[in-house]
Image (tube, helix red, strand yellow):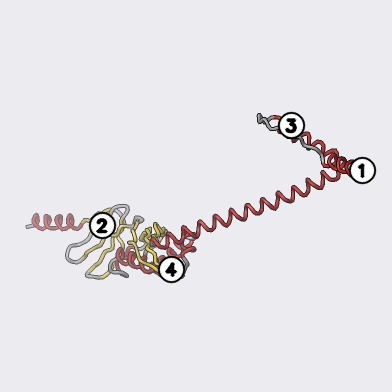
Amino acid sequence: MIYGIIIVIVFIILISIKQIDQYERGVKFTLGKYSKMMNPGWNLVLPIFQSFRKVDIRTKAVDVPEQDAITKDNVSIRINAVIYYKIFDASKAILEVENFYYAVSQLAQTTMRNAVGEVSLDELLSEREKISQKICEIIDKATDPWGIKVENVELKDVSLPEEMKRVIARIAEAEREKEAVITKAKGEVEASNNLAVAAETLAKNPIAVHLRTLETINDLSSDQSNTIIFALPIDVLKAFDTYNKKNKE
């Protein structure tokens, strides 16, 4: 009889031993009420009277499904994201929300759509990191009562309709043409200013005109063409003109 009781007690103890791994926490219930948090290692959970739930406290990556959204400037897009979070209070994750995996995913989807609706398409494409941070803060604040810490939210892809892609391509092409025209105009202004300065310098110093003439002749001499060009200073032409006038008189 005594041996039978001992065997029963040993059996109850053996089936009551529950192992909690290092990356887990256990939530123990006694007669249906939350009683304590179970730390990693072996813990006793008495059959019938007690029960427990394991909770993984490692960082989780949840892929937020692609969502249809409309930006502030009424552009229809499809956007998806990934959210990283971990549980810092396992008891709240079990007691305060029915299924925290599903709840976090749904909260991320609605928050992402609302955040996209508050910005224009240009802001969404150029300030993706800033918008991701805003979404992260909103979700983190909402999940704090569930014992969940949202570590990061990353917008993965923004898909545009084909019509909008063509419009953006035309806008980008127009911007490039605009920059090219502006750059060319600036270059012409600088060139004309330099020519004006050079002309003024040559006008003040006749020797500089002759040196420039000799340099031009030297450049032409390197050409293998049969055409021969003689560059004469303007002063020489004026002298011929004066001589002709005197002969006519």
Q: Nearer the viewer, mark 4 or mark 3?
A: 3
Disc with the residue nearer the chain's start (2 vs 1):
2
Q: Residues within 10 Å of mark 1 (few under 14, many from 20)?
A: few
* Residue indicated by mark 3: 218
Residue 225 picture quarter: top right
The residues tagged by marks 2 and 1 sit, at their Cα atoms, a distance apart of 127 Å
Residue at x 89%, y 43% (from the top left corner) = 242
Q: Residue at x 70, y 50 (%)?
A: 190
Residue 175 quadrant: bottom right
User: Do the CB atoms of the residues marked 2 and 1 lie less than 8 Å apart?
Assistant: no
Q: CA distance from mark 3 to mark 1?
A: 35 Å
Which residue in the protein does label 2 denote?
A: 43
Quarter of the figure that contains the C terminus: top right
Image point 36% across, 56% down: which residue?
59
User: Which percent across, then down, holds residue 211?
Assistant: 81, 36
Q: How far across and down, in percent of the image, does residue 38 sit?
A: 29, 59
Q: Which mark is residue 154?
A: none
Q: Residue type at mark 4? A: Thr
Examine the rendered structure and indicate whether residue 22 appears above or below residue 233.
Answer: below
Disc 2 to disc 4, how far (Cα)?
52 Å
Instruction: State the residue position of label 4.
Output: 71
